[in-house]
Amino acid sequence: MNVTTTDLRSRFAAALSAMYGAEVPAYTTLVEVSTEVNRDHRRDDALGSIERVTAERHGAIRVGSPRELADVAALFAAFGMHPVGFYDLREAAHPVPVVSTAFRPIDTDELAHNPFRVFTSMLATADSSFFEPELRARVDRFLDARELFDPALIAMARNITADGGCRPEVADQFVGRAVDAFALSRDPIDAGWYDELAQVSAVAADIAGVRSTHVNHLTPRVLDIDELYRRMVARGVAMTRAIQGPPRTGGPAVLLRQTSFRALAEPRRFRDAGGAVTEGTLRVRFGEVEARGVALTRAGRERYDLAMSEDDPASAWTEHFPSSHAELAAAGLAYYRGGDPTKPVVYEDFLPVSAAGIFRSNLDAEPTPGRRPSDVTGDVAYDLTWLAGAIGQHVHDPYDLYEKAATE
Ligand code: OOG
Ligand code: NI
């Protein structure tokens, strides 16, 4: 038993990165520029060593059903990645028909070793404000009939989780098969079905219009995202969005700042009603980069939400936030190890507003009709408790984890 779940996670993150880089050339540029920015930053940052930050990635995947989500949970457990938080993107300003969680390591030393995290979303087919009963039934049937993960792979994952690791030859096979499960499939897509779902939501088509899942982005971390943005633009990569999240301020970096670019349209084959296969394209994969700051307490998060609701958050920022880690610590607005303001606890999670924006800005279809006004949203109350039941695992509260990191 010489490959631990911790080592498996590092290998998995690196292998996914290699696969994604081979398929999405702009990602390789992004990683190169990120590495340069981190190197030019020169010093280790209180928010993370250059080594950790440069190896750091998050990915995003989307699945269709509770059964598929439970498989993802079982698979990721073998990499020491556990569900943290519940995100309801149906509640966003521009609703997306999914509910999500993040699978990631939860212990301080595990995060230090490799913090790989995957934002994982599930299509909320039971929400009748998106899916009428007849369509829901067809989507659920389609999802029930497909198999995203080979049961043998999931069985392997369960054994590895139980044993805390595996032998080297098993490790190579396991990581290889796990990565393959997230590669973009080249199988022909049923054009009629895909288009019908795209009428409801581009996200619904991306998730349930095909027979497989895929990593839709892989995000490196940089220590200076404004500098990264400038260098990407200078290289001719058009960034799709301004930087999302907290504005740049002279003060401490808080939470998470992100920006993204649209991927190229990739060739795909479509099968029409008569069975004829034609060439077409889809843009489903894209690039994103992020900079992480200190984790905020609940009180700090309230201040953040207030600051972001201002017309111009950047100029109102100092009305809500002090300008040093010492003051943030003294006011109980952010987490620090042992209360020491030189030791910020890094924010390891996601931001729902940014996440909803990422969904929206990167799909081929134009803004979809979205949610139909309705008081009744279906027979499933999607929430954290529902999620825990669906996957059969405890879903961690991020604040508990930060609290623990600050006091251990
Ligand atoms: C996930 C979007 C969320 C982030 O960084 O906030 C996300 C998706 O597009 O599937 O990755
Ligand atoms: Ni992301």
Image: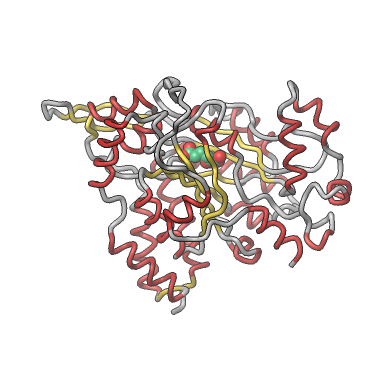
Query: Which residue is depicted at the point 28% across and 61% down?
Result: 151
The residue sitting at 62% across, 64% down in the picture is 107
In the rendered structure, the answer to whether residue 398 lies left or right of residue 185 reads: right
Q: Position of residue 252 (x, y in %)?
A: 80, 43
Give the percent coordinates (x, y) of residue 336: 78, 56
> Residue at left 41%, top 71%?
160
For the question of whether residue 29 can be seen, the reply is: no
Q: Is residue 135 visible?
A: yes
Q: Look at the image and tell me in which quarter the C terminus lies.
A: bottom right
Left or right? Give the position of 48 relative to 249. Answer: left
| Depth check, front residue: 19 or 334 | 334
Check the image and report above or below for 311 versus 343. above
Question: Which quadrant holds residue 153?
Answer: bottom left
Frontmost residue, 165 versus 142: 142
Q: 293 or 162: which is nearer to us?
A: 162
Q: Quadrant of residue 222?
A: top right
- Up the image or down, 262 lies above or below 183; here it is above
Residue 238 lies, in percent from the top left, at 54, 25
Please, which residue is most extreme toward the bottom here?
Answer: 1
Q: Tell me what residue is drawn at x 78 percent, y 49 percent.
A: 334
Name the spot of residue 81 as percent of width and height, x first.
Answer: 51, 60
- Residue with the most extreme left position: 274
Quarter that holds the N terminus: bottom left
Asked if residue 236 is positioned above or below residue 1 in the image, the reply reads above
